[in-house]
Amino acid sequence: MSMLNVGRPTRPDTAGESTGHASLSGGRALLQDEGLLFEVGGWEKTGVDLDETPGFDESDLGGLVRDDLRLPGLSEPEAVRHYVRLSQKNHAIDLALYPLGSCTMKHNPRLNEKMARLPGFADLHPLQPTSTTQGALELMDRLAHWLKTLTGMPAVALTPKAGAHGELCGLLAIKAAHEAAGQGHRRRVLVPTSAHGTNPATAAFVGYSVTEIAQTDDGRVDLSDLAAKLSDDVAAIMVTNPNTCGLFERDILEISRLTHEAGAYFYCDGANFNAIVGRVRPGDLGVDAMHINLHKTFSTPHGGGGPGAGPVVLSQALAAFAPAPWVVHDGEGLRLEEETAGEAAQAFGRMSAFHGQMGMFVRAYAYMRSHGADGLRQVAEDAVLNANYLKARLSVAMSPAFPEGPCMHEALFDDSWLEGTGITTLDFAKAMIDEGFHPMTMYFPLVVHGAMLIEPTETESKQELDRFVHALLGLAEAAKAGDVERFKGAPFLAPLRRLDETQAARKPKLTWRPEPTGVAPAPLAAE
Ligand SMILES: *Cc1c(COP(=O)(O)O)cnc(C)c1O
């Protein structure tokens, strides 16, 4: 692998270390080598052919002329190939199983995409007069209705743009409610040890301090530890249900009772709602605020940082504090309540400049309507069935973290089955890449040693799950037989070999500069 002296390695392993076959071109079978846009494009050329603009000899900018922008020029075929080649280096749910636990990488139905591209939705401008956006407002209103119905909660804030943003919205509503009740001294948030990292991060962002709640041996919130830590300075608890170990919190009613008794609010991290949608209404469990990742439960595409949508449902106690805007019906149809005055005087403010991620609203609503109420219930049932199938079949070789009883939508394994092999969870995950499977979530939740968290979702067939099981059991056998090299050197067949992920996370190089020597591009010639 050649390492550019600036930036990250961009070249595949062409030395043939892995297979004994080096290619002359840097390509790998029909997968082409591809550099950065700046390396592929030419400085002296452009992909467009524009007429000279008549009468533009003199700049009106008082001599402020920008030159030497150093933007690479590519012809159309070069630009198209660049991005298609890059896309082939990336894994995608459209290519194969994407078993990242907690992330819910399910198929994104094409119907949703078609609906989101309807010009009446896709071409809207957020500042358009509402008389011209009645259909879009109606869709938001109906989506809100479905979310409230599915969760059994009276209010929903649609604007948060991700799960973490929803957590922020929920905690801000809780903070506003405490302050309105003269309870502003409550500054502590209780979070179980297995929580997603965004939970404590959100609490800290709001200015709260975080206290951890211990976990029982069977992967649930430790009720006695919770009871011991609840006091009159606690603002809220943040509990995920089903939790990040893929288990239903058996004592959820008791958790909410104890929390309310102590004067605190129950924030539920609803990222795993896909496991219970249509079967359990969080409002019935005593939840006060919960975000719903539309991009997980309701199939809108995600990965690579977005876009997502994280609407937050709120209980009666918090509804008045919901952020603006929301859709209201009045004599002239639908409009957005934007002012935090009058009836909306207690709204804590707003979460975003406009109304949220319209494209995601359309996709999620299309998903809900195409499944119907019975279909959504089946989504949860099939997601849980698929995870239990994997748990049962993989348990012959791998060690489930919580062997007792069934799991919900995720099968969680620890690394005790690798003991003595010299192979780690990371090595095993890298070997999966050579088998054509994206690794599962690794080393999360933190409470399980060497965790491997597998979430198949409901959109995988039994045939695909069997292919996955076959590969994993084969790898497990190789690991136990002492074939260490297969794992330590993996991935052998990917365009890039094993990267220094610590270096990449700690010292990311986010800008590109021409190499100091060699192929430095010539500055654009002044016309
Ligand atoms: C995905 C996830 C989040 C964060 O959601 P984003 O949309 O990525 O911000 C929070 N908690 C849990 C349990 C999750 O799985």
Image (cartoon, rainbow, N blue to C red):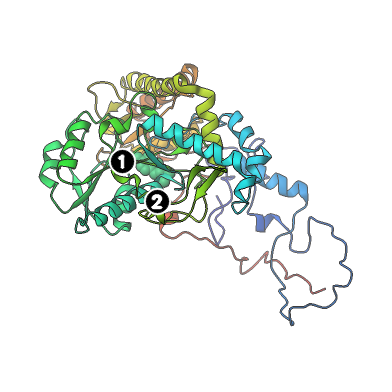
Q: Quadrant of residue 39?
A: bottom right
Residue that label 1 marks: 316
- With respect to residue 310, does 201 lie above or below? below
* Quarter of image, ligand 1: top left
Ligand 1 has an atom within 8 Å of the beta carbon of the residue at disc 1: no
Residue 507 placed where, x, y %? 44, 60
The single residue placed furthest to the bottom in the displayed view is 62
Please indicate whether residue 419 sits to the left or right of residue 473 in the image. Answer: left
Is residue 118 something that shows in the picture? yes
Rendered residue at 57%/43% (across/down): 332
Q: Could you tell me which secondary element the residue under label 2 belongs to?
A: helix
Residue 419 placed where, x, y %? 26, 33
- With respect to residue 293, does 7 lie above or below? below
Q: Could you tell me which secondary element the residue under label 1 belongs to?
A: helix
Is residue 301 something that shows in the picture? no
Rendered residue at 59%/51% (across/down): 126
Residue 140 placed where, x, y %? 52, 39
Residue type at numbered disc 2: Glu
Rendered residue at 88%/72% (across/down): 55
For the residue pair 346 and 106, the one nearer the viewer reads as 346
Which mark identifies residue 93? Answer: none
Distance between mark 2 and mark 1 Cα atoms: 15 Å
Q: Identify the mark nearer the N-term, 2 or 1.
A: 1
For the residue pair 489 and 20, the one nearer the viewer reads as 489
